[in-house]
Image (cartoon, rainbow, N blue to C red):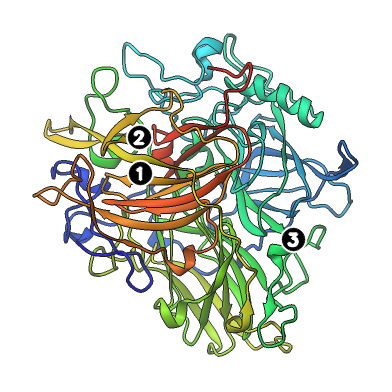
Amino acid sequence: MVETSLRFSRRTFVAWVGGASAGYYLFGRLPGRRASEALALVAGGTLDPTTIAKFQTPMLIPPVMPRAATIRQRGDKPVDYYEISMRQFEQQILPAGLPATTVWGYGAKAARSNRGLLVHHAPSLTIEARQSRPVRVRWINELVSADGSYLPHLFAVDQTLHWANPPGGTGGRDSRPRFTETPGRYTGPVPMVTHVHGAVGVNDDSDGYAEAWYLPAATDIPAGYATEGTWYEFFAGQAARAYGVEWGPGFATFQYPNDNRAATIWYHDHALGMTRLNVYAGPAGFYLIRGGPDDVVLDSRTGLAASLPGPAPRENDRFPSNKRYREIAIAIQDRSFNTDGSLFYPDSRAFFDGIVHDYIPDGEFSPIWNPEFFGNTIMVNGNTWPFQTVEQRRYRLRFLNGCQSRFLMLDFNRIPDVEVWQIGNEGGFLAAPVNLTANHENRLLMGPAERADVIADFTNVPLGNHILANIGPDEPFGGGEPDEDFDHADADTTGQIMQFRVVPAVEIDDSTPPRFLQLPAITPLPAQTHTRQVALIEKADEGLDEQGEAIEGPVEALLGTVTDGVWTEREWTDPVTENPGVGDTEVWEIYNTTADAHPMHIHEITFEVVNRQRLLLDESQEQVVQPIQLDGDPLLPEPGETGFKDTVIAYPGQVTRVRAQFDTAGQFVWHCHIVEHEDNEMMRPYRIGPRQPGQPD
């Protein structure tokens, strides 16, 4: 067994929890087994990624979402108001000369200034918020055609999962339907509900609860369809009482108090059983919170305010801009394409491991759901392999891993003489700057949904073109070191992220060198009043391929509880088992019994990473022992995990401990942010405080 704190990555063994038959390796692999022994190049659509010209398109720096108005709420407090819709449109994601791509994306419907940018894009424009100044958004589902008819999904929706299920009507929505024969894909209107990932202190009516979805206000919704999720009406009444806002056909109005520390958070769709498909279609964007005492950075040499690289985009900037932005948000996503420019996402379970039967209802396997997905093309801010021109000076780069299942290991070593420091993560600034170049091999590990606030100093980088690389795997990640424990991503495709074109500086860089940054103090949470033990579990079964050969493969990923060292599987519909009291501080011990690392996200709060600790394996070194036993001393979190986070990597065969304070009563969720896992039972509701009068069962 290997410990988890070596250089840039948190090392771990890769625990195997299923049979070693062909196919199941994608959910994990035996210790010491290299990926090259099992995996070929990443499969995808009909467009060969090696034929896509790289570094032809300048990287789009996301503009700022225009406000529709500033309003006054009760008590005369100003609120920034937005009207934002999700639409379908064509976007030039591939380089010029290749076909455009049909995507979904958010965009403003109204702007208070005639300079406001009314454009839909994938990923979308950035919402700029101020700490403690509320933001109110009318989120509108406009997935309709020009004549008002609903638009079907771009991808195959698996109706055998526990999902939104509009055809089930009010009695069968938000359920796992029963079938007498294997169903085909769902082709009806698309549910949506938006979650601001990382929002702290938000009421549950505005959190984007997975059962609070709604269909577009289309003219042809089939008779008998549910048009809203189970919790929509309850939350609509709650929001009306709390903020005096209206909900209606095709929209909901959410409010965010912005109680966070200054931080990089983001927003995306969160519909039940469909998040993987909806987000893959494009709807996501940055949400930056600025201001407050946690946004004050000092220069340790003088004790005065430090200067971070800037400027960043501002509302109503000219587009395209005439400014040289030096604070840049960078969303990295993996996608696959067809030769007609369309996005490729599998429409059969056979794509994953070759299992073709028995499918539900005769067997356990869902016919379309894929346990994980890895695109063979890298997309950055909505373009494949773009370039960004930078001067020989410092830049602030806010990275987001927006991939479906892919863990990224950003590698700056192909940029000679660059110096890279991490200053923040999901919860805002770290306790102190972390020199990735000197102490972490110039590399940065990011699980899906994790963010990293980085200062990259190009001052001494030679003029010319240099590539930001990715040495993470083209397969599920179980921890460990590249070359030793897994192969790098394909060097010609997914091993490249983007190109930096370094040019001379046009003026003196007056930003503070990162080593002199004194980041705002972090106030630790109170001691815990309760320790809660939960589990990550994967359920497998045996199916058959086209030749009738037996293949063991994943059926669903699950969360569960741990009592006296024994884990119990829990599904979405099971009663709430995580129920902190209002104001309680708890430590959650997340026991990972699986062979995957899982990026675990808890809505509503940010948390401190306390430590990790190995779990004892059985004699075969292939499974976690029950009752669970600890093995070795706790391992402290990595420097880049200090402060507060909202997503943490839970490694296989370890317990990961996080501490959080639960201050806002209501119904929320926690889940794995490998979105394919989230959509098939690796998400659970949790409640802060007592049941609310009138809430749905």
- Residue 651 position, x and y percent, is 33, 54
Identify the mark at residue 561; answer none if there is no mark: 2
Seen at 38% across and 27% down, the residue is 571
Q: Tell me the CA gap for discs 1 and 3.
A: 39 Å
Residue that label 1 marks: 372
Depth check, front residue: 562 or 61: 562
Residue that label 3 marks: 292
Graded by Cα atoms within 10 Å as few (under 14), some (14 to 19) or many (20 or more), the crowding at tag 2 reads many
Depth check, front residue: 668 or 159: 668
Instruction: Please name the amino acid that badge 2 sits on.
Output: Thr
- Residue 285 position, x and y percent, is 62, 50
Displayed quadrant of residue 481: bottom left
Does the residue at mark 1 contact the one at mark 2 (Cβ under 8 Å)? no
Instruction: Please name the amino acid that badge 3 sits on.
Output: Gly
Seen at 32% across and 28% down, the residue is 367
Displayed quadrant of residue 447: bottom left
Q: Is residue 9 above or below residue 518?
A: above
**Mark 2, secondary structure of its residue:** strand
Seen at 66% across and 83% down, the residue is 300
Seen at 20% across and 46% down, the residue is 624
Instruction: Please name the amino acid that badge 1 sits on.
Output: Glu
Graded by Cα atoms within 10 Å as few (under 14), some (14 to 19) or many (20 or more), the crowding at tag 1 reads some
Does the residue at mark 1 contact the one at mark 3 (Cβ under 8 Å)? no
Q: Is residue 158 above or below residue 309?
A: above
Front label number (1 vs 2): 2
Q: Mark 3 or mark 2: name the one nearer the start of the chain.
A: 3
**Mark 1, secondary structure of its residue:** loop
Depth check, front residue: 296 or 557: 296
Q: Mark 1 or mark 3: name the one nearer the start of the chain.
A: 3
